[in-house]
Image (cartoon, rainbow, N blue to C red):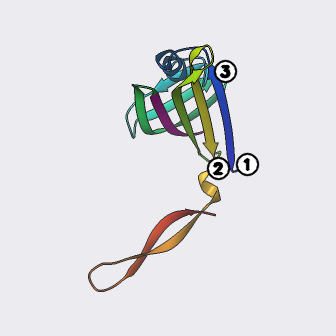
Amino acid sequence: MSDRIERELELEASIDAVWSAVISDGWLAEEVDLDLWPGGDARFRSGESEKIGWIEDVCPPAGDLARLTFWWAADDEPATRVELTIEDIAVDAGRSTRLRVVETRPLDLLDLVGTPLPGPGGVTYGPALVAA
């Protein structure tokens, strides 16, 4: 997988309708089971394929914006981060909705490095994730 995959769709539907489609069965996978709160479980099944993960952030439709961010992986594949942003946009014929999907590189492409941490007795070095 490349470092980043990004797609945008313009849909003739309301933010609420697009949100409902994204979190329901059919769009992300044939069967979708999401605990819609940060840290909640995420499960996606299509045929014999299954991806599992967790919810990083969820902002249901409020005004002209909604967002869902989660991590997922199939079996022993590296996990990827998926961010879905849904926003109301103005178009010539009135209003429309933009759905932006960004999937970023797996965790195994990140380096674990030491970060200086101040504390009693002086500076120590602890782990921190940074992009490779």
Label 3 crowd bin: few (<14), some (14–19), many (20+), radius 10 Å: few
Q: Which residue is mark 3?
A: 47
Residue at 50% over, 23% down: 23
**Residue 56 in the image: above or below residue 48:** below
Q: Earlier in the sequence, mark 1 or mark 2?
A: 1
Secondary structure mostly seen in magenta is strand
Q: Is residue 87 visible?
A: yes
Amino acid carrying label 3: it is Gly
Is residue 70 magenta-colored?
yes
Residue at 73% over, 48% down: 2
Q: Quadrant of the C terminus?
A: bottom right
Q: Which residue is mark 2?
A: 105
**Residue 127 in the image: above or below residue 31:** below
Q: Earlier in the sequence, mark 3 or mark 1?
A: 1
Amino acid carrying label 2: it is Arg
Within the image, what quadrant is residue 101 found in? top right
Q: Which residue is mark 1?
A: 2
User: Which dot, 2 or 3, sits closer to the camera?
Assistant: 2
Label 2 crowd bin: few (<14), some (14–19), many (20+), radius 10 Å: some
Residue at 67% over, 39% down: 6
Q: Is residue 74 visible?
A: no
Give the structural element (helix, strand or loop) at label 2. loop
Residue at 69% over, 51% down: 3
Q: How far from the left and from the top, in percent, is residue 126?
A: 43, 72
Query: What is the CA distance from the residue labelled 1 to the residue labelled 2?
Result: 7 Å
Range drawn in magenta = 65-75
**Are dots 1 and 2 in contact, CB under 8 Å?**
yes
Number of numbered discs on residues: 3
Give the structural element (helix, strand or loop) at label 1. loop
Q: How far from the left and from the top, in percent, is residue 127?
A: 47, 69
